[in-house]
Image (cartoon, rainbow, N blue to C red):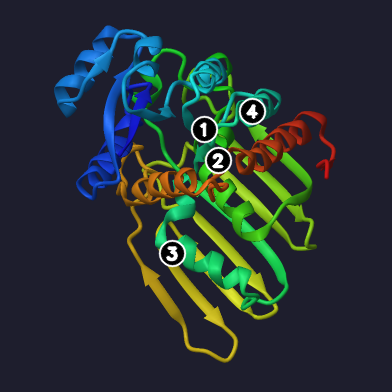
Amino acid sequence: MNGIGIVGLGMASAPHVLAIRDLELAGRTRLIGGYSPSAERREAFSAKWQAPVFESLEAMLAAPGLDMVIVLTPPGAHLPVAEATAAARKHLLVEKPLEITLRRAEALVGMAARAGVTLGVVFQHRFRPAAQRLKQVVAAGELGRLLSCSATIRWWRDANYFSQPGRGMKARDGGGVLLTQAIHTLDLLLHLAGPVAQVAGFTRTSPLRAIDTEDIAAAALRFTSGAIGVLDATTVAEPGFPERIEIAGTGGSAMLVAERLELHLKGRGPEVLDRGLAGGGGADPMAFDHGPHRAMIAEMLDAIAEGRTPMNAGASGLPVQRLIEAVLRASDSGQVVRLAD
């Protein structure tokens, strides 16, 4: 049975542990243990989950039965942790964003490829049933030629969220609402609608919190397919609302609101797949079901066992970082930015 270790024992570890425990009951994997440089976090993790912890990364990587490591540290620490893990010949599942800059993210992807280990990125929204149904519809051409593709992320983060040292700062997180919160929905938009060719954008920091990253962003997008759309992202919309993706094509339209999908295909009646609207958009960023995490980890285990590329391969996490950096450049320059092919 494949064994999984977790590096980084903050709030993001909970859905991963719950997912691993479900898969453990199914005989798919087991939790080897966790590591954090913080003794306090190690103690809290061990007490909450009744799981082993390690006092060093090296000790965890040497643990018998370890096959894959889930990296949940702040983004700027992903690359060194991944390098040590790959050197130990362990597979990697890395939290979004892959790293704090596109260049570092590309370096991480290249490093894993050279080491011959499987690298996945934590974009669990791709594994939501409603998102998977919409992906199936788009891939089958049922929406026809895509014409309009937009994303809206109007979330809220309170003072308690930003009370953690460094949160919302470039040194720790690499970016603000785009890289830290909206990235999930933006990745899903690209996963569904394909790459973006041109961007015009605006970003700013509100007076609500003392951070050096943007918490309000807007952009106009031109996709390589010819479709156009808009991005509206913020964490100042109290109390927070479900994120939304809207796609219209020559064959119909779709609206995906958190885990609720509404499809209107020409010549057919409406189709609704409703898994709820909770998505972590409010003050509690962890207010979501861990089912998509379970499906994502299961996909990684299957890909490793079958020697294939996972659906959430690390390289597939690069386009969204490329788009985010383009939005920021467009805002800084006041010009339309053309993304590289």
Q: Secondary structure at mark 2?
A: helix
Residue closest to the far bottom? 267
**Type of residue at label 1?**
Thr
Residue 95 appears in the picture as rendered = yes
**Type of residue at label 2?**
Ile
Disc 4/disc 3 C-alpha distance (Å): 28 Å
Residue 224 locus on image (x, y percent):
79, 56
Q: Which mark is residue 180?
A: 1
Q: Earlier in the sequence, mark 4 or mark 2?
A: 4
Decide: is 50 above or below 199: above
Decide: is 117 above or below 268: above
Residue at the (70%, 69%) spot, across then down = 146
**Type of residue at label 4?**
Ala
Decide: is 231 above or below 229: above
Disc 2/disc 1 C-alpha distance (Å): 6 Å
Q: Would you say 258 lies left or right of 230 here? A: left
Circle 1 or circle 3, nearest the eye: 3
Residue for badge 4: 105
Q: Which mark is residue 130?
A: 3
Residue 284 appears in the picture as rendered = no
Disc 1/disc 3 C-alpha distance (Å): 23 Å
Residue 180 locus on image (x, y percent):
52, 32
Contact? badges 2 and 1 (CB < 8 Å): yes
